[in-house]
Image (cartoon, rainbow, N blue to C red):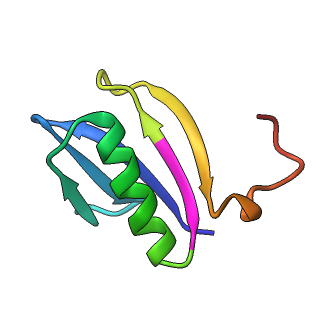
Amino acid sequence: MENFHLVHDNGVYKLKKENAQRASKVIDANKPEAIKAARDFIQNQGGGSLKIHKNDGGFQEERTYPRANDPKQSKG
């Protein structure tokens, strides 16, 4: 499963594949719209894990798309 991070950077949100240097997608929107755009992108890529970061850089939450791919053994 691919892992992606949604981070706030200079007024936009960047969706980056884990360990990538460049963003897969730059989203100029508010946070809820950015999460929705990231979800759509990940689902079009065949699914994956989205790690959402707070605007100050800290970790907020993790979501799996599609939800059927969510590991059952994990907490949360």
- Among the 4 quarters of the image, the one containing residue 29: top left
The residue located at (45%, 76%) in the rendering is 44
Q: Main secondary structure of the magenta part?
A: strand
Does 38 lie within the magenta span? no
The residue located at (10%, 35%) in the rendering is 10
Q: Nearer the viewer, residue 37 or 20?
A: 37
The residue located at (41%, 33%) in the rendering is 53
The quarter of the rendered structure image containing the N terminus is bottom right
Q: Residue furthest right?
A: 73
Q: Residue furthest top?
A: 56
Q: Is residue 47 above or below residue 14?
A: below
In the rendered structure, the answer to whether residue 29 lies left or right of residue 34 reads left
Q: Nearer the viewer, residue 2 or 47?
A: 47
Q: Position of residue 16 (x, y in %)?
A: 34, 57
Q: Is residue 25 visible?
A: yes
Q: Is residue 18 visible?
A: no
- Among the 4 quarters of the image, the one containing residue 31: top left
